[in-house]
Image (tube, rainbow, N blue to C red):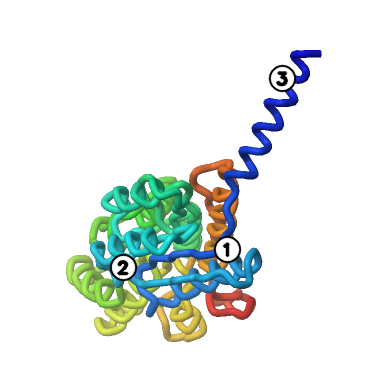
Amino acid sequence: MKSRSILLAAAAAVAFTGVASAKDLNKIGISLGSMGNPFFVALANGATNKAKEVNPNVEVTALGYDYDMNKQFTQIDNFIAAGVDLILLNPADPKAVAPAIARAQAAGIPVVAVDTAAEGADATVTTDNVQAGEIACQFIVDKLGGKGDVVIVNGPQVSSVIDRVVGCKKVFGANSGINVLSDDQDAKGSRDGGLNVMQSLLTRFEKIDAVFAINDPTGIGASLASKQANRTNLFITAVDGAPDIEAELKDSSSLVLASSSQDPYAMAQLATQIGIDLLNGKKPEQQVTLMPSKLVTRDNIADYKGWTAAR
């Protein structure tokens, strides 16, 4: 009987501790690449709307660090000083951001990374980027009938880009008729970078049948370079499903034929829910949660609900 009383007392203590450690969601700080980028705008909107489901009066501060690492550090420190309950971030540098994350955690603030993993974050929510690379490059293999000369226009070596290229190479490597001419040129994930790198690749290689670009801006830049060089006998796939690529897929003159989509709104909703769970002592089953990617093509673009679609 005595042992049963001890067990009951212990259980009560655990329950009491769980309640005591729970925190209300009153303030969220969000640090993202650029609020001029529709991807990050959709992330901010998704997080805000999920937070307001929990507390309609929640104060959400979403800021762009404009790809300046020091600016992101300052934002995180300001969030800590403001006493936010949760921080969501897309890291400027996945490793260098670790000390700032540690400072937030020391202040009792959970940190959830979105889109790109960040060292030390309590959790990460991102697109299944390996899958995104696989389906974009399987489209290339299928359209070429398993034979052809292809290039991969690479980008900054963050986890999302690395994973996309891993997935793409896995598919190309399984098809002996696919010859990868280049896979290491960094186009900086931008339209201008895609234009410049593709111009160089077109000069180097007389025959290119298809291009995998690590994101939509890169793919659009590669398409522009190919048109300018009168090399329109190739086609391009990419990753993102961004508003700009929707227009490309609806334009019959574009060389971009497909893009593996991301859903930043849903990504941020899930990241916010995981953050709320962390506040209440519930850790996610996995440190990294992967969201599936779907291939958007000219055939299904009419049915695609993109980043800016009403929710």
Q: Quadrant of the N terminus?
A: top right
**Circles 3, 2 touching at the beta carbon (< 8 Å):** no
State which tag comes first along the sequence, 2 or 1: 2
Residue linked to disc 2:
189
Q: Secondary structure at mark 3?
A: helix
Q: Is 91 rendered above or below residue 198?
A: above
Q: Amino acid at mark 2?
A: Gly
Q: Nearer the viewer, residue 253 or 54?
A: 54
Relative to 34, 109 lies left or right: right
What residue lies at 32% left-to-right and 60% top-to-bottom? 77
What residue lies at 44% left-to-right and 59% top-to-bottom? 87
The furthest residue to the right = 1
Counting from the top left corner in percent of width and height, residue 170 is at 42, 47
Counting from the top left corner in percent of width and height, residue 120 is at 38, 45
Q: Residues within 10 Å of mark 2 (few under 14, many from 20)?
A: many
One can see residue 37 in this view: yes
Residue 212 shows which numbered tag? Answer: none
Q: Amino acid at mark 1?
A: Gln
Q: Residues within 10 Å of mark 3 (few under 14, many from 20)?
A: few
Residue linked to disc 3:
6
Q: Secondary structure at mark 2?
A: loop
Q: Quadrant of the C terminus?
A: bottom right
One can see residue 154 in this view: no
Q: Nearer the viewer, mark 2 or mark 1?
A: 1
Q: Is 247 rendered above or below residue 34?
A: below
**Circles 1, 3 touching at the beta carbon (< 8 Å):** no
Q: Is 219 rendered above or below residue 214?
A: below
Residue linked to disc 1:
269
Q: Residues within 10 Å of mark 1 (few under 14, many from 20)?
A: many
What residue lies at 40% left-to-right and 78% top-to-bottom? 255
Q: Nearer the viewer, mark 1 or mark 3?
A: 3
State which tag comes first along the sequence, 1 or 3: 3
